[in-house]
Image (cartoon, helix red, strand yellow):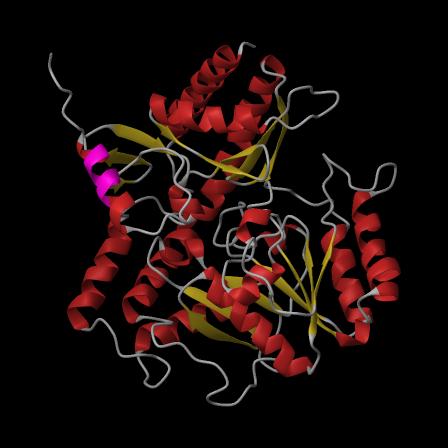
Amino acid sequence: MTTRTKSLAEEFIARDAANISPSYTRSYPFVMAKGQGSEVWDVDGRRYIDFATGIAVTNTGHSHPHVVEAIKKQAEAFLHMSGTDFYYAPQIELAERLNKLVPISGPTKVFFGNSGAEAVEAALKLARWYTKRPRFIAFYSAFHGRTFGALSLTASKAIQRNGFAPLVPGVSHAFYPNPYRNPFPGEDPGQAALDYIEKHLFKTTTPPDEVAAIIVEPIQGEGGYIVPPDNFLPGLRELADKYGILLIFDEVQTGFGRTGKMFAAEHWGVEPDIITLAKGIASGMPLGATVARAEIMSWPPGAHASTFGGNPVSCAAALATLDLLEGGFVEMAAHSGAYLKSRLREMAERYPVMGDVRGKGLMVGVELVKDPEGKEPWPELRNLIVDKAFEHGLLMLGCGTNSLRFIPALNIPEELLDEGVSLYEAALADALQAIGR
């Protein structure tokens, strides 16, 4: 009797289990060895199409030569000098470009951190400092990060909060308008969500003159790739202005071309007062940014800082990333996203369990349901599809309770996009057969 030799992936996973926090949420045993563009290979040499992009991070694909060259050049010059105490060109140049790009009119200023959660934390501190108000409004199903301030805003999954109370006080949650699952049956979902804030929260638990800011994802990410109705964000802007409340857009996942525009806010022409950025900002290098109107970001030296925020190598990668995005990648995302949605919607006619196909650009979600009429969520099917996709050679991620996210690189070639969609359909068919449908 022969004993099966462990694969390299199995060996690494065993070592991981012995040495790394179990809090991470790996759903299938992919151990990456290398990546190029929209293709990746594991340590055993197996090839995959990447529809996950490191959770919507590698917007320019894996190891784009222009980004890699910028990283090498900066690494050879110097790796670190801490922008909180010293000056260096990459950080200044990146701030200049971000200030020109963000959808905020008038002068703006940038604070650099290392991640989306840090960008959100900076936004919270800045809003409290500027307004001298203690409260915030966030939304159910939102995800803003796992540090204490960001977690206090997050209302995506109970496991993310379980065991960590008490959280930061003063946060109230409102309903995010979901056209597919309207939390206000019979009413316009966008207007009803706005009315809930003004006519319920403001009159019961959350005095508006104590609210520093409303923070919202222009398109909800972790919550299920929910695209709000067109009246919601403009209405939220009007509501914030009415009560002197700052409006913060969390564009950590929606920014940098992901939705077919540089920032998702541009789809609705709505300007925030503060915007938080990360993920696709530097093609995989750790970097986050909080950008605010200059009159808001007027806090004094020492009020907030970060040793590694705005690291010169990360800034160089971000500058190279912006070159690519402005050089055509954003338009590619818009074109490829329309094509992807058309293919998925055609597929949904043959597979009614795909209850809803939604999104903008290459931020596309598919919601799985047991009954298209009753819209009963089917998380078990979603989870099985993710596993089956891996077996077929496709990397995917779920979101929300029962949705899948399709987030390939913005520059994915059409033949690889087609191959990935075909692999998804094979995984869906396998999953339905395994369940007995």
Counting from the top left corner in percent of width and height, residue 160 is at: 54, 51
Q: Residue at x 35, y 53 (%)?
A: 283
Whether residue 360 sits left or right of residue 324 in the image: it is right
Counting from the top left corner in percent of width and height, residue 132 is at: 69, 83
Q: Quarter of the image holding residue 285?
A: bottom left
Q: Say which quadrant the N terminus sits in.
A: top left
Counting from the top left corner in percent of width and height, residue 346 is at: 58, 19
Question: Which one is nearer the viewer's eye here, 135 or 354?
Answer: 135
Question: Which one is nearer the viewer's eye here, 165 or 212?
Answer: 165
Q: In this view, does 43 lie above or below 176?
A: above
Whether residue 269 sits left or right of residue 400 in the image: it is right
Q: Which residue is drawn at 52% across and 72% down?
A: 122
Q: In this view, does 142 lie above or below 378?
A: below
Whether residue 243 sits left or right of residue 116 in the image: it is right
Q: Say which quadrant the C terminus sits in.
A: top right
Q: Residue at x 25, y 60 (%)?
A: 70
Is 29 within the magenta? Answer: no
- Looking at the rendering, the stretch of residues picked out in magenta corresponds to 10-15
Counting from the top left corner in percent of width and height, residue 144 is at: 55, 57
